[in-house]
Amino acid sequence: MEAEEVEAEEPEPSAPPRDLTEVPGVVVEDADVRVRPGLAWGVIDRLESGVSVTALQQAGGWYRVRHGAERVGWVRTTMLDLGEVEAEQVQEQSAPPLFAEWRGAKYGVMGQSADGAEVRLLENVEASPMLISAPIGDVTLLADDVTLEDLPILIGEETVVFPADDFRVGQGKILPKANEWMWLPWGWLLAHNDTHIWQWRPETDELEFVERPPGFARLSPDGRYLAIDRLCDRPAVQCDYEPYAIILPLDGSARISALALLSRRGLKLEPTRPGNGLLFLDWAPNGKAVSFYANVWDGQEAPATSLVVHVDGQLVLFDETGSLVFGDRDCQTSVGFPSSPGGFNYSWRIRADNTIAADGGCVEDNVEEEWGTLVFSLGGEFLGVDEYPWWRERDHDSDLVRSTTGGDALSDELLLGWSPNDRYALVVDLVAANVWIYDAGRHELDPVQLGANGSPQARLWGVLETLGEFRHFNLLPSWHEDEVAAVIISGSVARSVLLVDATTSAGTVLDLGGAALYRDLQVAQGWNPSGTAYHILFGPFVRGDGLAIEAPRIFSLLTVDRTGSLTGTLNVASTCGDSVLSGELRYRAGWSPNGKLFAVGGQDLDGIFACPE
């Protein structure tokens, strides 16, 4: 009788060891060693590829390593190869928070001011974090590994202008808080805050102020006007001021009042606005008209209406909910389909081609139906129905890209980002996890080569989270003419930047380092006028190193060259008054017209949120 063969049970795999320390590793790319985890911290050493180090701990995408003669510092995890040991197996231990003593009390340390004269301290008042500034000479830093001079720059409410090639502490020109600012073509900085409009003239360092009426405000794209909206955000019984919506010419000529223009037509505004703030204050790109959002009362009802006020005094009304009849065509807007940015239900929006549009549809002779986007001139002329809604991603000619040699292997999940003149397209295949440059002139598809030796493109997605069989990839290309593109890559746990030279298809990945936990991707990005440097303002990162703890939100600003090499780092605090908030404020960063100056900071309330009282 044959013995019955018993299949041996496979032993259950044992969990890999965790909380490892003293892990030997090898540097796989030339790496900067920083005094603390985070790109904003200063570089204290440089390790060449192939150097042996010892990983002591890891914290949010960074290893603390020992190298050389017992020197210790932080490098990004992507720069080391620990053999069979994964990053999550290494002991997780954040850098200790930074504290300082000032006037006999203990405070958290956030950074130093752009001129190097002050230290930004964090104080908890009734569980509400408050930023205060103290003279740097009066502060004692309670840390063994960092000096006051090592602290990164932290920009709060003020606007700071740096020489574009020098972001060191002490090089910044600190200007007043600005809700909004813009570089004028001749190189002046135009801005406004809650009470004033101001201009800074770099060549003479003059700062000129002009008082302005209160209210939400937005500059016209050409810098010639300020639109101010002071309609009631709450029921009329709680408003202790007379509501208004005006255009204020900055050349000193007479203001244009939306209420006066309505009154001439026998109409008036309801005391309460159906929305609030800057979300509903929208300038045409040519600066010739601005839209306000309000209830307009005709004696019987007060429907929600977009008021388009022209700088020449013309007024055009666009009903948010009513029917529109054009000959035999009966049209209807579709409020909130799709919902506007931020999820608010309002229909009309001014577009990049200086038209105004709303999602909706038309029925002609009670038979034929068109559905898409209703388009009008800003003067009120009906221009027709666009087939595609405004929110559809610009992915035209994907079939053209697939018709190239080898293009038939592309999946159906493509993202395309075209250069300004449609010479090139950055092509992302979400299924294959690869990136190409499509050259329309040659009708060829060239794979993007990452690194000097064309290292595997999988690295591009290596730190990003997967969802099913597709990858998180937000294609937000920022092109400099038809030459080079920068793409911010974001998943739910990590982010990086891809820089691609379209003429050579050479690409570089800038790993931003650290796990990024955030609610919204808030980004300011752009190339300098010559296309040699790119900036990205991103965040917030939640780290345990004392710079971005739970309550405050610290945004990081980086400037890099075309190769992805860092040329400057800053931190920007999201503040409202002295209180440190999150998410409610959008920050600006941008180059002067000649590319010699770089401005960053200030706050822009988006009209939905307000500072806490």
Image (spheres, rainbow, N blue to C red):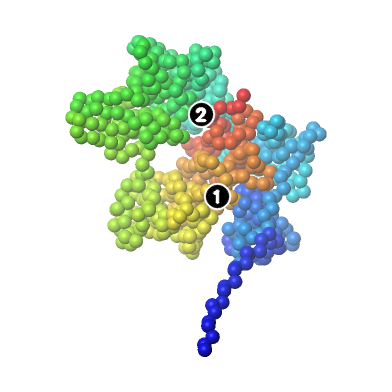
Rendered residue at 74%/37% (across/down): 107
- Residue 151 disc label: none
Quadrant of res 148: top right
Of the numbered discs 2 and 1, the one sitting upstream in the chain is 1
Name above or below for residue 18 compared with residue 234: below
- Residue that mark 1 sits on: 493
- Residue that mark 2 sits on: 608
> Relative to the observer, which residue lies in front, 606 or 497?
606
Q: Is residue 257 left or right of residue 422?
A: right
Provide residue 454's location: percent of width, then percent of height.
Answer: 47, 63
Q: Which amino acid, by three-letter code, is at mark 2?
A: Ile
Quadrant of res 251: top left
Q: CA distance from mark 2 to mark 1?
A: 27 Å
Q: For the residue labelled by badge 1, is the local secondary structure a helix, a strand or a loop?
A: loop
Rendered residue at 67%/32% (across/down): 128
Name above or below for residue 270 compared with residue 411: above
